[in-house]
Amino acid sequence: MNPAKNQDKVKPKGTTEDAGEQLSLMEPTLISESSRQRGGLLELAFELGARAAGFRRSLPTGLLTALSDLVRSMNCYYSNLIEGHDTHPVDIERALNNDFSSDPAKRDLQLEAKAHIAVQRWIDQGGLGGPAATVASVSEIHRRFGEALPDDLLWAENPQTKQRERVIPGAFRQSYVQVGRHVAVSPGAVPRFLARYEAVFSRLGRAESVLAAAAAHHRLLWIHPFPEMNGRVARLVSHATLLDALNTGGVWSIARGLARRDTDYKAHLGNCDLQRRNDLDGRGNLSEETLADFTRFFLEVCLDQVEFMESLMQPDRLRLRILGWAAEEEKLGTLPAKAGKVLEAMLYRGELSRADIPELLGVQTRQTRRILSALHGYGVIASPSSRAPWRLAFPATLAPRWMPGLFPERR
């Protein structure tokens, strides 16, 4: 059946019309047991689970926190980049410190990045309180993101009709829409299709959730529930799904991998919109083979990102990069002597109590305060309160030196 049977063309904005599309138009939602690719995909999913768990366990608590903070900025940068919004992590870091550009357009993008990070932090801290693939979770992610955006970014333009629709945070679209060759379901049908999406993807076990993450990602985009921000919401939902199913700790990001293979990513999404090609291509309306291909691509991108972050965090190499930077700064006189010793201790222990640092350095309290103040000024150590332990931080300004390849250097 043709998804656009009742939609000869993209209709203009109007009431939330339900054209009565059958839910079977979105099938298959999962890779079937009979799929010839399922065995290999399960092996990839299990390998991803083992690698992700091993990487997370290898990080001390203090480094886990520091890395997840940096990955939020990285994830935000790459997810927005996929949408054509290029806000460098250095500018994102400035926005987090309320240091905004005087250029209105750049300021808007900084505010967008700040909103994205706030939503991901909320997710990482357990804000969803349940599965990500539910109508309530998807709507809440969109609402939180949208409510923090400047007004200029809360408009969506239909490329066919050129009509503009106001984006109401958390509210579903009121218009028909076409993305590439795909005509999305009628606006009134969105709640019905999202209910089906929730019924399928929110009740899976952890292993099946990993295997189904790509399918959930595409089917959410296929429904296209909102007038704007669907791609970023879908990637945040995928992040939340993997965070829960794999207990990732938020220390790696699929968005980086998808952005680096942007052409392939969008081609796979387009292919998943295609109808079943023949009797060997599953039993649903849409192609199961292209869904399986996207699943393989998605899992391989995840594995690639885990491996990349593992390579960056190899203790000996990370230590050499960080201590090499500290030694240069000490030689230049921009860091006090023994500052590198503090960073080295944090690399091994994860964090340092305030009482332990003077003894570690063998200096007076006043000199300790000077060293800590200098390190804090560079943004390389952080503490949540005046009495809490100090831990390592990864500032975006030093990422090219400390974490090479994480994101492009700022032009």
Image (spheres, rainbow, N blue to C red):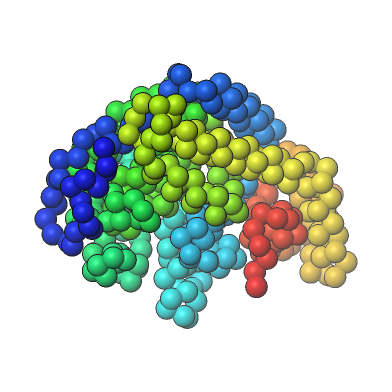
Q: Does residue 24 sit above or below 150 in this rendering?
A: above
Q: Nearer the viewer, residue 398 or 381?
A: 398
For the view shown, which residue lies furthest in the top direction? 33
Q: Nearer the viewer, residue 56 or 52?
A: 52
Circle count: 0
Tell me, yes or no, if residue 351 can be seen here. Answer: no
Q: Does residue 387 sit above or below 244 in this rendering?
A: below
Image location (x, y in percent) of residue 22: 21, 35
Q: Residue at x 77, y 41 (%)?
A: 314
Q: Indicate the quadrant containing the N terminus: top left, top right, bottom left or bottom right.
A: top left
For the view shown, which residue lies furthest in the right direction? 331
Image location (x, y in percent) of residue 12: 18, 62
For the view shown, which residue lies furthest in the front direction? 278
Image location (x, y in percent) of residue 6: 18, 47
Q: Does residue 362 sit above or below 291 in this rendering?
A: below
Q: Does residue 103 sit above or below 68 in this rendering?
A: below
Q: Residue at x 14, y 45 (%)?
A: 18
With 205 as the anchor, is 26 left or right in this view?
left
Q: Residue at x 38, y 56 (%)?
A: 180
Q: Quadrant of residue 368?
A: bottom right
Q: Indicate the quadrant containing the C terminus: top left, top right, bottom left or bottom right.
A: bottom right
With 361 as the anchor, is 379 left or right in this view?
left
With 174 as the anchor, is 119 left or right in this view?
right
Tell me, yes or no, if residue 227 can be seen here. Answer: yes
Q: Residue at x 27, y 70 (%)?
A: 162
Image location (x, y in percent) of residue 404: 73, 56
Q: Nearer the viewer, residue 324 or 275?
A: 275
